[in-house]
Image (cartoon, coloured by chain):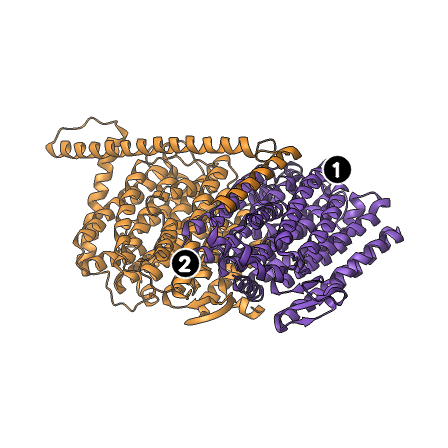
Amino acid sequence: MLTSDPWLILLVVVPLLAAPVCVLLRNATAAWAVALVVSWSIFGIAVKLLIQVLEQGEVFYRIGGWDAPWGIEYKLDPLGAFVVVIIATIGAVVIPYAKKSVENEIQKERIYLFYTMMLLCISGLLGITVTGDAFNLFVFLEISSLSSYVLISMGQDRRALTAAYRYLIMGTIGATFYIIGVGLMYQMTGSLNFADLSTIMPAIADTRTVLAALAFLTVGISLKLALFPLHMWLPNAYTFAPSAVTAFLAATATKVSLYVLLRIFFTVFGEVDLFATFPLQPVLIGMALAGMFLASLSAIWQENLKRMMAYSSVAQIGYMVLGVALATEAGLAGGIIHLFNHALVKGTAFLAIGAIIYSTGAVTLRDLRGVGKSMPLLMAAFIVAGLGLIGVPLTAGFVSKWQLVTATLEADMWPLAALILLSSLLAVIYVWRIFEVAYLRDSHLAPVKIIKKLPLSMLIPTWILALASLYFGTHATLTMDIAHTAARQLMGGM
Amino acid sequence: MTIDMLLMSPALILILGAFLLPVFKGSMRKVLTLALPLITLVAVWEVGDGVQVTASFLDYELELVEGNNLSRLFALVFSIMAFAGGLFALNRKNITEMVAAFVYAGSAIGVALAGDLVTVFIYWELMAVASTIVVWSARTEASAKAAMRYAIIHLFGGVVLMIGVIGYAQETGSIDFVRMIPNSFATWAILVGFLINTGAPPLSAWLPDAYPEGSWSGTVFLSAFTTKTAVYVLLVGFAGTELLIWLGLYMIFYGIIYALLENDMRRILAYSIINQVGFMLVAAGIGTEMAINGAAAHAFTHIIYKALLLMSAGSVMYMTNGKRKCTDLGGLFQSMPFTTLAGIIGALAISSVPWTSGFISKSMTSQAAFDEGLAFTWFCLVAASAGVFLHAGIKFPWFVFFQKDSGLRPKDPPWNMKAAMALFSILCIWIGVQPEYLYAILPFPTDYQPYTQAHVYEMLQLLLYSGLAFFVLLKLMKRTLTITLDVDWVYRKLLFNAARKATIVITKFNRSFGNTKNKLVSKIITLATEHHNPRGVLARTTPAGEMAFWMIVVLCAYLIIYLFV
């Protein structure tokens, strides 16, 4: 059942309007307070909408009262609602954390700009998820991208500028590819509405224009998704961005891109059986596997913790895409559940790294000897995240791994199941490196010095995400049901 | 899961309690070290029949604690072992090892009490991690490397097991841990996952590679849990699988041959673990009630006497600053009478001398083979009993405590180590003299009588002759004696030399294989380092132009796929 609900538009409008308010305030604390209120109210709205979607079916809102497909329609199905909750949760956790972290890493007079950009970025990401319009999606893609370039460039290290610049170039090419794809589709169909496109598509799906459009869309989104080999912008961007930004983007931006990929493949081209028509499966599986193994290997050799986790993100994206590439309900559910679980796990990891930087000023392994003894509570959370990356039982990562392996076995691809599990052993190695440095190596020497005491406002958010990943590792029924519902709906379109 | 349910899981008492240890210092820590296993012991004893504690995971119901005679027996001996190991290691400064060892013991108990495959897997992985840290805790270069190799093998085993468990859940829709038949991909994967932990061929080498590198106290723990939990899960899941008999026989003789060639006292004992687990595998493969009783009883007694042997070896190491080669040791009985006595009692028990625990347990397996009419197996088991006496029963105590006088005069170890050895010595003899108490808690009711005249005479004859053989061969091995050319002697010498040559060739082959493998491995590692280090082609900062190039490549690829395929 469809219900019209104005809350949907508030999700996007509130942060979008709050952003200029922050500029007008020109005060760090005031801007932070605005961002805090906004992020928490969005969290409330997101949860409300998720419950509503699960209980009563899809929610929509027509802008200006124009009916679809002429007007812009916002629409929330279970998958969208799930992604919205992820973005809102991470936002609500990162903003309180950001206060101290940002004061430490960004000049005081530019802090209000930071919150402005964060709000814009949240608004953009939420907009991508709720909109049912291909061009509107591009607008929000640009809002979120531009604000994230600015956010990355605010990093302490001067290399943050070049990292942001490279990301800008690449992101712009990616967005251009996307809009070329949308343009070609529009040329053929005269429509921009996803639902409308999906009904027109079967008739024209074998035309060259539409197929070229699909190629542009796939590549453009793959770049934003950082799917191997288009991941090269990601490590530097994550490494040099301010810690709070890294945590936020790592947990949300690539996830939203995966959402867009699912939309295109399974909604717009839902009536066309892409995976049966084209050898898409081996290509996607190949890229996913390359990402899983090569990026994990790269993570093993990194000295900088942020960089290590960034490569680990590329590898984890491989798992999600692998699930999608199976193009079965179980596979999609695996990809979607990992999207959620990985957001929690990687969010925890980057928040913990940010806290380490705050307290010790160090981020490379060799400088962090005995950090487990200097910061026992925080490192415990980091280890929980590390275990989640490996997929150890009781953590959320295990649930993802279980579902992905189930899906591959169901599709009779047991070598793939073995590869999933073997690649998770690579995660063991890099997590072990951190563990060894933090707790074991040269334990007779004095551990790393604490320069600044870690404030609770940074410790608590880290632990909230860590506990969430433990909670959803042991009580996976809820998230799994949502993932299955979303997957079923996507597959229903096929 | 609520708090009171938590308390009902004996495994968690030990696992979570372990993390309290670093919180306390001094005597409080010592009290806790001894109290935790005792509380666990009581909790294990109190576990009733059937499923006790459940939790839900996805659509499945986990049976975290399920009691029956077999599982309680294993959990019981694991708790006893944790207590004695804790007592023995009481004056070890390194707290990491103690925490890891208790988590290790706790997860072994967890496996023993698990009612479903997912719970088994969870504790299985925890066990792998905790035992790796125990090996690592010796804090030597060799132990760090051995720990890495050990971890790789066991995590690989975990991967195989997990595929099996998920596949099994998918095939049958159930995760209940019951008897399986290896007839599908999933059940085979589960079997292989289990077997890796027993030290079965072809992956036997991890055990003698890793265990001897543990610290003097760590190895005592290591000897008990991993292989015996594997025996337990095989008894539950794959009893009666004929393959296990053959693997077991291979392990029995593999253990004997390599132990006879070995010079490091703890490696001798490590090979002997493989040998002993071989007996248990054979019993699991026979799979009758008598055989399962035999395997369970043997696992129970073996944990105790093998720990006793390693405690005496550990005491020697502790008092001599880490000496462990037979050629460096000898004549220690003069200054270490207590340790010598403990070592001898352990050696007698492992050799199944009547009136020790080994006699009343191991003979059940032979009896089971006999009852089933498995003549070849029975013959091998009897022959192997002689071999066990040679390598563990005499070789270990002789070279360490007697032999030549090495000039070392270490004293007996501190009271707590003596107390731990005394406890296990008494258990070895008490179980041997009063077997009815152990028989009463076996999985199946039994009226087996070990002390018939025929049994006792047969065993004593076997032992006396192999004992004799040892001292004769000993002189041959030392090559200090000119040999009187008797026909009988020529025959024995030829046979012995042939056997020795064969094993040398095999060892050489293994070594060279190991070397090429290492070369390959190091090549791979160099290659990976070249490509993945922060300056390597796969991990360096890429210029925007290059990234754009890759985008075009991928775009072209997709265009080709969509338009022309």
Q: Which chain is purple?
A: A
The x, y position of residue A74, in whole percent, is 69, 63
Observer-nearest residue: B150 or B338?
A: B150
At x 40%, y 46%, the residue is B310
Which of the 4 image quadrants contains residue B331? top left
Left or right for B439, reference A376: left
Q: Which chain is orange?
A: B
- Res A208 visible: yes
Left or right for A369, reference A325: right
- Res B24 visible: no
The answer for which chain carries disc 1 is: A
Q: Looking at the image, is mark 1 or mark 2 nearer the viewer?
A: 1
Checking the image for residue B167, the label placed there is 2
At x 55%, y 40%, the residue is B556
Residue type, label 2: Gly
Secondary structure state at the residue bearing disc 1? helix
Q: Is residue A404 above or below residue A289?
A: below
The x, y position of residue A479, in whole percent, is 58, 64
Image quadrant holding the N terminus of chain B, namely bottom right
Secondary structure state at the residue bearing disc 2? helix
Labels 1 and 2 within one chain: no
Residue at the extreme left of the image, as rendered: B487
The x, y position of residue A111, in whole percent, is 83, 47
Observer-nearest residue: A185 or A36?
A: A185
Q: Which residue is mark 1?
A: A161
Q: Is residue B456 above or below residue B343?
A: below
